[in-house]
Amino acid sequence: MKEYVLLTGGMGFIGSHTAVCLLKAGVNVVIADDLSNSSASVLDGVEAITGVRPPFVRCDCADRTAVDRVFDTYPVSAVIHFAGYKAVGESVEKPLAYYRNNLNCLLTVLDAMRDHGVNTLVFSSSATVYGEGTGRPFTESSPTGGCTNPYGQTKLMAEQILKDLCRADARFTAVLLRYFNPVGADESGLIGETPRGVPNNLMPYVMQVADGRLPHLRVYGNDYPTPDGTGVRDYIHISDLASGHLAALTWASSHPGCHAFNLGTGTGTSVLELVHTFERVNGVAVPRVVEGRRSGDTAVCLADPSLANRVLGWRAERTLEDMCRDAWRWEKKQNEGTAHE
Ligand code: UFG
């Protein structure tokens, strides 16, 4: 019988690149997404890249009846759960919406999995669970907690729910993938990130400055204790992040229990380094002004990815140059109207 991996939220930035990676590896995928922060045309991009158009069900993952229908229609062997709201600033404005949506989606999917005998879940977590840290690379045993916003709290709570579930049910596998800063786009330029409104994250903002849609980048602080004073992050190419899901899924089937892995490169890049690299590889100008620090930001956030390297046999391979080049290719195709938003 043909089995499927269910990608909840599979039309979004990380989900769609993971769909491409899985389909290229010959894994059958079914996508469930309410399109609240994505568009159905992403499927055209996925199909153009892979030659496969995966089944797509438009559904709210907090709607038990709709989620049951997906499990009843497709024999699901495992779930990768991406569905959730993700804007840090918005989560401070609308905490109840974030807690309700992100936790209800997870709980509903878990209930449906239990009732359909599905025991493997890969969860879309975040480096935000580590809170502020000390500036040294985070390992999976670094303390968690201290998140300053409801978005981060929902990730932390979801991890706790999955730990408790694995403790109660010895057959269940939960792999918590803690993402650092995903950027870039599929090298085809046919799928990528499509932020709604003015972007909050650095790379999408840089691109909109480079193509003239925004006047200049605001560099949030140049007085951090970093080599050039600007914030340092661990940027990871979205296609490397996607392949981390395939590695986790392959490994998960024989490893019951709850396991966390960092998905990052281990290399830090400052805001100015990213901007300089973007300008150099793409031959464009990114005007900028230095402003005060953004509230909630930390100086440095870096992964120690050695556990995922060793245990999952996974490693991020693409460079910062690749990230900047591929992100810009996607942006240009969108402006030409040839991309699939
Ligand atoms: N930055 C600017 N100007 C901008 C946007 C960002 O200078 O217009 C700087 C920030 O101050 C920071 C760096 O660029 O130093 C990266 O900022 P992002 O907003 O791109 O990413 P963050 O590291 O703040 O946030 C990311 C994810 C969150 C996650 C968080 C913690 O977007 O989902 O990491 O892991 F919660």
Image (cartoon, grey):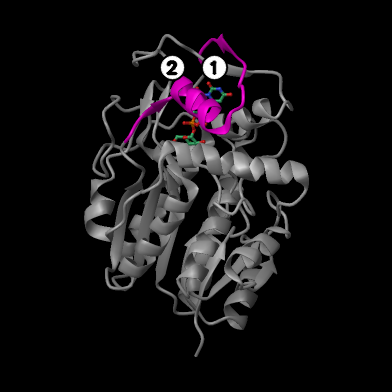
Answer yes or no: is residue 167 visible: no
Report whether 334 appears left or right of 283: right
In the image, the residue with mark 2 has its CB under 8 Å from the nearest atom of ligand 1: yes
Q: Looking at the image, which is closer to me, 142 or 10? A: 10
Report whether 111 appears left or right of 68: left
Q: Which residue is mark 2?
A: 230
The vertical placement of 273 against 322, above or below, is above
Q: SS class of the residue under badge 2?
A: loop
Graded by Cα atoms within 10 Å as few (under 14), some (14 to 19) or many (20 or more), the crowding at tag 2 reads many
Looking at the rendered structure, the kind of residue marked 1 is Val
Report whether 213 appears left or right of 132: right
Q: Mark 1 vs mark 2: which is more N-terminal? A: 1
Q: Which residue is mark 1?
A: 219
Residues under numbered marks 1 and 2 in contact, where contact means CB atoms less than 8 Å apart? yes
Residue in the picture at 46% in, 28% down: 148
Looking at the rendered structure, the kind of residue marked 2 is Thr
Q: Looking at the image, which is closer to me, 248 or 84? A: 248
Q: Which range of residues does the magenta coloring cover?
A: 267-293
The vertical placement of 14 against 132, above or below, is below
Residue in the picture at 51% in, 86% down: 2
Residue in the picture at 42% in, 58% down: 243
Q: How many marks?
A: 2
